[in-house]
Image: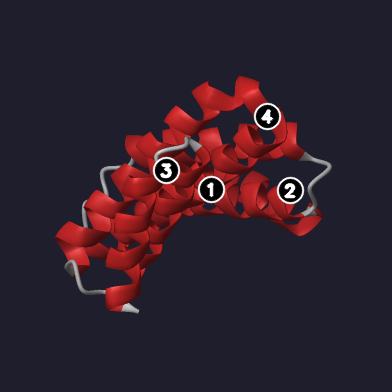
Amino acid sequence: ESKLVQAKQLCRTTSPNDYRVLANIYFCLAEVNHRLKHFMTRAEKYYRKAIEVAERSEAGDTLFQLERATMLLGYGIFRHDAASRAGAGGQLAIAEAERMISQARCIRSQVLGESHLATAECTDALAHVAESAGRLQHAVQLFDKALRVK
């Protein structure tokens, strides 16, 4: 994590307008903190910052759109994890998770197509969210759709 923080500082100093690199650094920091589990507040801050910076970027190329989709998916999975930990009070986190993962799926579907594994990964994540929300029939449909690709 300390190396990523140094990279962030270096990027801000040498290329303050390179939002693409900065967004990816924030995303990596978020993923590291999410995986460590006990740094969830810090992880959420970095996920939000990564998405905010990515949205400021003028890079409209396909690769960056896919990177942005990965950031949205990562944050959506994080929010779903938060909803699972919150129990009955996690409905807001579930709604946010669904919104983020849906955006990621939309981007991947547009860029890669419906039959791509990366799109199926988002469909699978949406199925898990639907299952957590108690929408079991919809979850089964989404799981089936994802499995047909995989």
- Depth-wise, is mark 3 or mark 1 nearer the camera? 3
The kind of residue tagged 2 is: Asn
Residue 77 picture location, percent across and down: 53, 48
Q: Residue at x 56, y 50 (%)?
A: 27
Which residue in the structure is indicated by mark 1?
Answer: 77
**Res. 5 visible in picture:** no
Within-10-Å neighbours for mark 3: few <14, some 14–19, many 20+: many
Which residue in the structure is indicated by mark 2?
Answer: 33
In this image, 84 relative to 51: left or right? right
Location of residue 72 with respect to 97 vertically, above or below: below
Location of residue 52 with respect to 103 vertically, above or below: above
Q: Which mark is residue 130?
A: 3
In this image, 112 relative to 26: left or right? left
Q: From mark 3 to mark 1, how far is it between C-alphas? A: 12 Å
- Depth-wise, is mark 2 or mark 1 nearer the camera? 1
Mark 2 element type: helix
- Depth-wise, is mark 3 or mark 2 nearer the camera? 3
Earlier-in-chain disc, 3 versus 1 = 1
Q: From mark 3 to mark 2, how far is it between C-alphas? A: 25 Å
Residue 47 picture location, percent across and down: 56, 40
Q: Quick check: marks 3 and 1 in contact, CB under 8 Å? A: no
Q: Which mark is residue 51?
A: none
Q: From mark 1 to mark 4, how far is it between C-alphas? A: 16 Å
The kind of residue tagged 3 is: Ala
Q: Which mark is residue 87?
A: 4
Q: From mark 3 to mark 4, how far is it between C-alphas? A: 15 Å
Within-10-Å neighbours for mark 2: few <14, some 14–19, many 20+: many
Residue 111 picture location, percent across and down: 18, 63
